[in-house]
Amino acid sequence: MHWFVTDETNKNSVPGQFFIYGGLVLNDEQAVQITDAVTEIRERYGYLAGDSFKFNLKSQPQQVAREQSKAAKQEVVAKLEEVGARMIVYVILHDIAASKSDEEVMNYALNTVASKYHALLVDEGATGLMLIDRADEQHAHLGSLFQFGINIDNWKAPLSDKIVLFGMTANNESHLSSAVDIALGSFRYCVNTAGGSGSEIVASEMFPPLARIIWGKTVGGALRLGGYGYVARPAEVRAAVYAAHYATLAASLERFSGGNV
């Protein structure tokens, strides 16, 4: 059984920035390994029961110094790579998404990452669960994904043959949610740095292990992440001003990764 635990980030609609949705794919053994690792990391760095362990510094408890928090988060990402976790992430420019309602933006993100997760499960002959961060307004859409699959225009794709449960979770309801928040928060920092908000030195240190856990496939002898674990939408960007943001993001992530994207 596989677990796909997801969340959203970069929710604020800032021109030139991207809304991000995604999460981590873990099998049963990996889910236990990451739970045990986060438990140990929290204890060693002074996080107490009830403290949030997230990427954002605003959630950092008072008794944990900033450098300790940074080191703890780096260890989580390193552990994800060590156990073989995979990551699926979706991005869309806020300037483009602004024409849709918040619910529509979220539904499209869920459709996209669910379809990629389904493809991963098909490749591996596996079944899995998909858990999103709590969003009560999404219950109906999750039910639709399970009952009917994806049905957009002329594209129809069943999901329940591989994804046997859609559900919700929330911060502090598992250590897996912490791992997802830290991985996505790290990815967000790199994406925003590509847009001019952040340190390229930090992003170049932060992104390589993330690039190595983003799900990819070898095509023509080369590893490809784009279209698999890294999905930029819409697939065709017609406006030159918007296309430039996508091109800058792709080039920046490749540079930060050392050529892995």
Image (cartoon, rainbow, N blue to C red):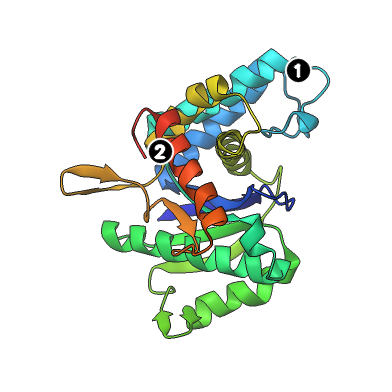
Marks 1 and 2 close (CB-CB < 8 Å): no
Q: Is residue 256 left or right of residue 59?
A: left
Among the two numbered marks 1 and 2 on one chain, the one whose residue lies closer to the N terminus: 1
Residue lying at 37% horizontally and 54% vertically, measured from the top left:
228
* Type of amino acid at the residue the image marks with label 2: Ile
Residue 59: where, in percent of width, then height?
Answer: 78, 32
| Quarter of the picture holding the C terminus | top left
Q: Is residue 148 above or below residue 179?
A: below
Residue 188: where, in percent of width, then height?
Answer: 60, 40
**Foreground pick, 180 / 56:** 56
Query: In which quarter of the view is residue 94 placed?
Result: bottom right
- Residue underneath mark 2: 213
Q: Is residue 159 above or below residue 13?
A: below
Which label sits in the foreground, 1 or 2?
Answer: 2
* Type of amino acid at the residue the image marks with label 1: Val
Q: Is residue 75 left or right of residue 259?
A: right
- Does residue 51 appear in the picture of this structure? no
Outermost residue toward the front in this view: 240
Helix, strand or loop status at disc 2: helix
Helix, strand or loop status at disc 1: loop
**Foreground pick, 25 / 197:** 197
Numbered circle sitting on residue 64: 1
Q: Is residue 163 left or right of residue 67?
A: left
Inter-mark Cα distance, 1 to 2? 27 Å
Residue lying at 48% horizontally and 39% vertically, measured from the top left:
32
Residue lying at 38% horizontally and 35% vertically, measured from the top left:
212
- Does residue 228 appear in the picture of this structure? yes
Residue 122: where, in percent of width, then height?
Answer: 30, 63
Q: Is residue 6 above or below residue 39?
A: below
Numbered circle sitting on residue 218: none
